[in-house]
Image (tube, rainbow, N blue to C red):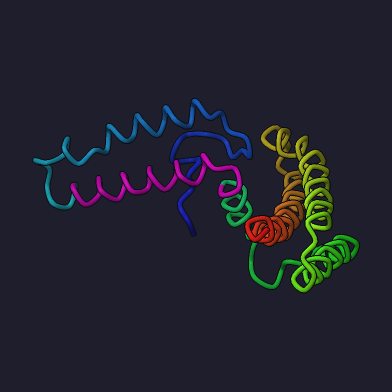
Amino acid sequence: MNPDYFEFYGLPESFQPDAATLKSKYYALSREYHPDFHATATPERQQEILQLATLNTNAYRTLSHPDQRMAYILGRHGLLEEGKQELPADFLMEVMELNEQLMELEFEPDPAAVQRLEQETQNLTETLDAGIAPVLAGYEGLPADVRPQALQQIRTYYLKKRYLLRIHESLAKFATRS
């Protein structure tokens, strides 16, 4: 099992932790676990300090980035295992249509079509973001028995967003060509 970064920082599991608190915990532990302050410690203790310093860096890097934080939390709850990535059929159809339009653009570059596709993808992304915002904001305050439902919604959002990100990346390649 991966280390619990929230526990390490003494914070509740949250999709929207307070950024200032996170940063202050990181800096405080960076000072506490700085190898220079433990130069006279036993080799075992120095090794332990090094591991804690690495844990601190990894925890901060993960928790301070919204997408990495989301993947981390979902992973801790076993919701990102391979083969469990089923998404609603209507969304998959929408993405398939977008991908077909992308393939057509490969053969017939059309700046107006690229722009339309970018707008469509952007609209889908904004709708997704707006839909999940209250779930992310309210997660921390949910009772334990309701959290699994919220996590399922967040998982679906996360997977959809990754699909849309791939389309955005493909569209960006077209933008650099023209």
Percent x, y of residue 54? 33, 48
Percent x, y of residue 86? 78, 67
Percent x, y of residue 51? 30, 50
- Left or right: where 70 falls relative to 9: right
Q: Is residue 140 visible?
A: yes
- Left or right: where 80 falls relative to 63: right
- Residue found 77% across the figure and 42% down from its top: 132
Q: Which of 60/125 is in front?
A: 125
Q: Is residue 79 visible?
A: no
- The answer to which image quadrant residue 111 occupies is bottom right
In magenta, the rendered stretch is 46-68
**Which residue is situated farthest in the front direction here?**
178
Which quadrant, please, contains the C terminus?
Answer: bottom right
Q: Is residue 120 above or below residue 63?
A: below
Q: Is residue 146 above or below residue 171?
A: above
Q: Is residue 19 above or below residue 89?
A: above
- Residue found 37% across the figure and 47% down from its top: 55
- The answer to which image quadrant residue 88 occupies is bottom right
- Residue found 25% across the figure and 49% down from its top: 48
- Residue found 64% across the figure and 66% down from its top: 81
Please check the rendered image and state whether residue 65 is part of the magenta-colored stretch, yes or no.
Answer: yes
Label tally? 0
- The answer to which image quadrant residue 98 occupies is bottom right
Q: Which of 133/74 is in front?
A: 133
Q: Which of 94/134 is in front?
A: 94
Q: Which of 133/176 is in front?
A: 176
Percent x, y of residue 140? 67, 35
